[in-house]
Image: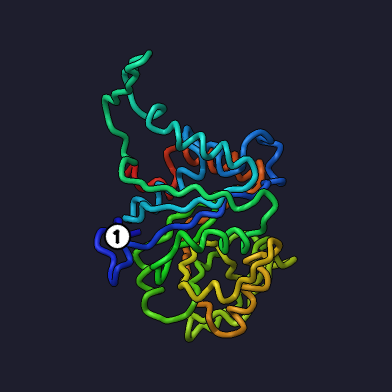
Amino acid sequence: MSGPCSCPANGASTMKVVILCGGYGTRIRDVSEHIPKPMLNIGRRPILWHVMKYYAHWGYNEFILCLGYKGHVIKDYFLNYEANSNDFTITLGTNKSIVYHNEHAESDWKITLAETGVDSMTGARLRRVQKYLAGQESFMLTYGDGVGDIDIGKLVEFHLSHDKAMTVTGVRPPGRFGELMINNSTSMATEFNEKPQTAGGIISGGFFVCRKEIFDYIDGSENVVLEQTPMRKLANSGQMMVHLHEGFWHPMDTNRDYQMLNGLCEAADAPWMVWDK
């Protein structure tokens, strides 16, 4: 994998990163039912932090977090980030003050924490943060519970090379996610099926780049699931392109995933932790 994208082309460095992190995480409740899944730790940090850290490594440090289930836990984490990451001196009383004595590496992050509904589906969550994307021709979109060593620079370059509404990162993990059918000569998606019984090849790994026109495919319903009707319509109308990623990618859906990702972290063999290399 190449290094960080220090000089993205065509204004790409201004792209915001929308992260869907409001689901219930029912398949991993055996690990913890008291915090939202994106706040489960890999090593000493929440997986959500790992996702954000990865984008920041590539020069994208403005985030919009779509909150839902136990969103206050994520809010509390970032509201207390300075105090939990730095040494500080606090003066109590009438003239109270806090002086931080060092800086953490995330000092340039800008994070919008948006309540998008406890029971909202992914399409509705995205629709509800549209107002925070004003002026954005394109933006990043991903999930708060999956990591990989995707070349973000090449992903953005590919997205900017076409005029379609969505670029999907195609990966080859187990067949329990949305399967993509691809025209190999054009890299255009021709069909999208959410979570097929068996997968014959490439599936959606998230790490999307979207043009603002994507909102034309998402209605105002709280029940609209991005990975169902909107993405099927995008594929059927020739508005979805696929950027293939042959490297590491893994979600944290189950206890087994949780143990595996933590094992990679503990062994200092986590492909996505490029900031430590």
Q: How is the image coloured?
A: rainbow
Residue 173: x and y in percent read 59, 60
| Figure check: 190 above or below 111 | below
Residue 263: x and y in percent read 53, 38
Q: Quadrant of residue 202?
A: bottom right
**Few, some or many residues within 10 Å of mark 1 (<14, 14–19, 20+):** many
The residue tagged with tag 1: helix, strand or loop? loop
Taking depth in this image into account, of 78 and 252 the one nearest to the observer is 78
Residue type, label 1: Cys
| Figure check: 55 above or below 260 | below
Taking depth in this image into account, of 25 and 130 the one nearest to the observer is 130
The quarter of the image holding the C terminus is top left
User: Residue at (54%, 43%) from the top-left corner?
Assistant: 261
- Identity of the residue furthest to the top in this view: 93
- Identity of the residue furthest to the left in this view: 7
Tell me if 243 is positioned left or right of 174 in this view.
Answer: left
Residue 259: x and y in percent read 59, 39
Taking depth in this image into account, of 268 and 192 the one nearest to the observer is 192
User: Residue at (33%, 62%) from the top-left corner?
Assistant: 14
User: Residue at (44%, 63%) from the top-left corner?
Assistant: 133
Residue where numbered disc 1 is placed:
5
The quarter of the image holding the N terminus is bottom left
Residue 167: x and y in percent read 48, 72
